[in-house]
């Protein structure tokens, strides 16, 4: 949805000299592939004449067209809200995990302090050592955040860089945690930084507890009190996380996504990136791409009347999106989802037969771009009556 029909009539294209290549796809005089959008595939499958009229600039007319645009915008907003709530829940759970880890560390250390021998280890002396270590580790953590040490050691080619490259090329995945190209990073590329800061915090807390203690029993008692206070704070954070999870789940159900889905991309028809296959000429923007069980799955939302079974034109359009997602993510995409409303959901398998069907359709569209001669592919009066371009069609049965 949203990629429109590719204009091959501009001066940049010489269709009169385009030829079919050995791989079956058509290329112009500059050896550039003829571009076919997923919307082209949907229109051509519905009716080649309707596709040809769209190619000539005859736009669709009717209330259903405007209603579809409005509903798609509403769906995009709901998906965006779900993604925001999902990210908020993840962040709050990570914060709670850190806080809970602090509690465990403090409890363990309080038990250890109660069992140490005052003759061998004095709390005041240990507090000074811990304070020095805390400041040293804190300085190291801040330094690793602000200097490009990964570049110095040749560690730039990591998961964060690969993700940034994917964002730059296709915008299929949007940054969730920190700005793109951030040198430090907090998660995939920031384990060193967060570990140093976390260690500095723990060492500092222990130093404070020991410095206020006159003996090992008092030090252990202070640490236990500190753990109790931290537990209250962690409980408050957990409550916030659970509220966010509930809001995220309600938003997921409102959109109609499967449980466990993570939104990686949503098309708003204005700013979403265009996915391109440079080997076939196929391009397009899926309505959504979600991550299910580690797989990138495209979703195509249809807002019209709910059919008894998926329309061929809709299924082929989704096949184009499956192919584009697979090519751009460089990972196998086993299926796509065709969704009519919240409840009517169809899983379209991506296999060799589906791939052959898609490529045959693309090659036929490219042939018609060069040779022309599109003909109506049906004898159904009702189909012509529902066509948004019947006003300009000489072959309409309506």
Image (cartoon, rainbow, N blue to C red):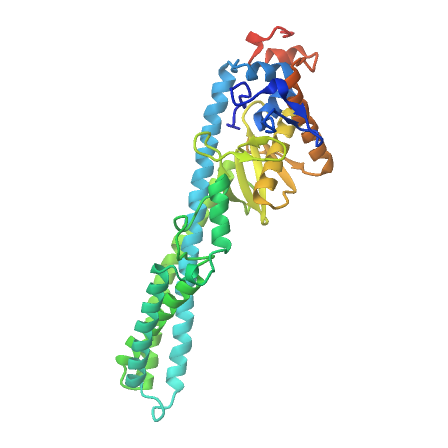
In the foreground, 32 or 366:
32
Point 40% across, 86% down: residue: 115
- Residue 339, percent from left and from top: 58, 32
Q: How many marks?
A: 0
In the foreground, 223 or 160:
160
Point 58% across, 10% down: residue: 390
Q: Is residue 331 left or right of residue 215?
A: right
- Residue 317, percent from left and from top: 61, 29
Q: Is the residue 328 above or below the residue 371 in the image?
A: below
- Residue 7, percent from left and from top: 53, 21
Q: Quadrant of residue 50?
A: top right
In the foreground, 345 or 84:
84
Q: Quadrant of the C terminus?
A: top right
Q: Quadrant of residue 307?
A: top right
Q: Is any part of residue 47 visible from this angle?
A: no
Q: Quadrant of residue 111?
A: bottom left
Q: Is the residue 131 above or below the residue 311 in the image?
A: below
In the foreground, 92 or 131:
131
Most extreme residue toward the right, as rendered?
353
Q: Is residue 112 left or right of residue 361?
A: left
Point 37% across, 63% down: residue: 144
Q: Is any part of residue 128 visible from this angle?
A: yes
Most extreme residue toward the bottom, as rendered?
119
């Amino acid at each position: 949805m949203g990629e429109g029909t590719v204009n091959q009539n501009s001066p940049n294209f010489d269709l009169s000299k385009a030829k079919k290549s050995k791989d079956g796809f058509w290329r112009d005089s500059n050896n550039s592939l003829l571009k076919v959008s997923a919307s082209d595939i949907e229109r051509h499958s519905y009716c080649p004449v309707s596709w040809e009229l769209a190619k000539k600039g005859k736009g669709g007319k009717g209330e259903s067209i405007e209603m579809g645009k409005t509903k798609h915008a509403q769906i995009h907003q709901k998906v965006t809200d779900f993604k925001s709530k999902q990210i908020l829940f993840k962040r709050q759970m990570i914060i709670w995990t850190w806080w809970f880890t602090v509690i465990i560390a403090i409890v363990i250390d309080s038990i250890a302090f109660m069992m140490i021998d005052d003759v061998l280890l004095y709390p005041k002396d240990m507090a000074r050592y811990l304070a020095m270590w805390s400041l040293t580790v804190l300085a190291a953590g801040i330094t690793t955040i602000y200097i490009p040490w990964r570049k110095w050691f040749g560690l730039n080619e990591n998961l964060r860089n690969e993700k940034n490259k994917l964002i730059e090329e296709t915008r299929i995945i949007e940054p969730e945690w920190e700005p793109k190209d951030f040198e430090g990073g907090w998660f995939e590329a920031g384990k060193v930084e967060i570990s140093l800061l976390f260690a500095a915090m723990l060492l500092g807390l222990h130093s404070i507890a020991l410095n206020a203690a006159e003996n090992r029993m008092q030090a252990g008692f202070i640490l236990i009190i500190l753990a109790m206070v931290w537990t209250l704070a962690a409980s408050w954070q957990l409550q916030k996380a659970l509220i966010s999870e509930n809001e995220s789940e309600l938003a997921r159900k409102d959109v109609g996504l499967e449980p466990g889905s993570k939104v990686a991309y949503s098309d708003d028809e204005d700013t979403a990136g265009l996915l391109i296959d440079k080997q076939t000429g196929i391009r397009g923007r899926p309505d959504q791409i979600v991550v299910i069980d580690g797989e990138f799955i495209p979703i195509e939302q249809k807002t019209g009347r709910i059919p008894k079974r998926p329309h061929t034109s809709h299924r082929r359009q989704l096949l184009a999106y499956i192919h584009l997602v697979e090519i751009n993510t460089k990972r196998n995409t086993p299926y796509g989802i065709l969704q009519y409303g919240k409840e009517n959901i169809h899983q379209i398998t991506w296999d060799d037969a589906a791939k052959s069907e898609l490529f045959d359709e693309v090659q036929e569209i490219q042939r018609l771009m060069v040779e022309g001669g599109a003909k109506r592919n049906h004898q159904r009066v009702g189909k012509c009556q529902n066509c948004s371009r019947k006003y300009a069609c000489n072959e309409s049965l309506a």
